[in-house]
Image (cartoon, helix red, strand yellow):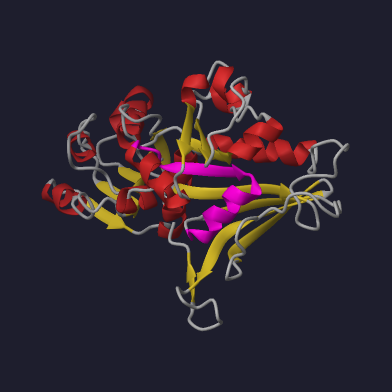
Amino acid sequence: MAAALDQAKRGIGLTSPNPPVGAVIVNNNTMVGCGFHRKAGEPHAELEAISDALQRSPKLIAGSTLYVTLEPCCTTGRTPACTDAIRSARIRRVVYGARDPNPKHQGRADAVLRAGHIDVVSGLMETECLEILRPFTKWITRGIPYVIAKAGQSLDGRLTRPVGEPAWITSEAARAHARRLRGRVDAIIVGAETVRRDNPLLTLREADAGLGKPQPWRVVMTRSGDMPAGAHLFTDEFKDRTVVMRGLDFPEVLRELGNRGVVSVLVEGGGIILGRAFASREVDEVVWYVAPRLCGGGRPSIAGLPLPFSIELNPVKILPIGDNVCFSGFPVWPAQGAADGGGQPVSSGG
């Protein structure tokens, strides 16, 4: 299953609105085929693995074991049902990690496969398999995207340096690490002030674009609609991938994007938009870069109305990047109405 997870990770950011899934086929402790879902509308991971095995070791498919990170689908949509392909390939045993989060399909594969005299085992490395399904799970069950909040700040919590100094707070290495987050998501959200002040590109880097990753939607939240017409977002080669959402609160933006099939978003700022995202309690993952610098002023990383609660990350990862540090993890939200100290914390369900 670890090998199937490695396959699944190759599809992260490429498969929306489908989930990333990986599969391997094993016979006599030998891997005879592997594959991952590459893009919505293209073969699922199970079919990719079967096709790979047919090319590499066609005589070893019959009687083999298929390991797949997600419960195989048993309905025909843009692609055939994977359970039919598994039965046709005469695979003897199926081991999958996580049940399908889609309530329309969840748990149906077991009966279909067992009716074809195929042994089924579920729940192997379930936690790890569910981890990479977090964005899809939120979207398919709630209809809104998974939200990653990202910022690069000084030690005193500022996003900008004093007037007259260079704009960047974090190091080039930290910024390069942060840009790779764009390869995981379907859309990037910023505020109009970020467009006016920084004129950002919000584009993919060559490595992600080379994998066939489409340019994420560039979403600008604005109250006034006052933005420079010559900004990169409105004039570059990806201008058709820019959407302006005027007068909408953060949850309304998420609903609109979810209706468009956007499964995951990256909130890149500024501080007011980040503050609205946290206030909505819809942030599912935090990636925060801190540089060894004191700015003494400038824009705070979380602005607008003060949050009536603090947010812990659990679990949390700490990654040194030169002299910068990246903190990442999942928010633990206080229970509604617990801002006065009562109630129990609630972990983000993704």
Image: 77 above or below 109: above
Q: Residue furthest left?
A: 115
Image: 123 above or below 267: below
Q: Is residue 281 visible?
A: yes
Residue 312 highlighted magenta (yes or no): no
Quadrant in the picture for the C terminus: bottom left
- Residue at 20% across / 33% down in the picture? 77
Judge from the rendering whether residue 278 lies leftward or rightward of residue 22; answer left or right: right
In the rendering, at what x and y percent does residue 78 appear? 23, 29
In the rendering, at what x and y percent does residue 271 appear? 65, 50
- Residue at 80% across / 58% down in the picture? 156
Span of residues in magenta: 260-281
Judge from the rendering whether residue 43 lies leftward or rightward of residue 175; answer left or right: left
Camera-side residue of 243 and 123: 243
Image: 345 above or below 208: below
In the rendering, at what x and y percent does residue 315 appear? 58, 64
Camera-side residue of 130 and 284: 284
Please count the marks in the image: 0
Camera-side residue of 221 and 33: 221
Judge from the rendering whether residue 49 lies leftward or rightward of residue 10; answer left or right: left
Give the quarter of the image for residue 179.
top right
Judge from the rendering whether residue 149 lies leftward or rightward of residue 250; answer left or right: right
- Residue at 46% across / 76% down in the picture? 337
In the rendering, at what x and y percent does residue 90 appear? 20, 37
Residue 272 highlighted magenta (yes or no): yes
Q: Is residue 186 visible?
A: no
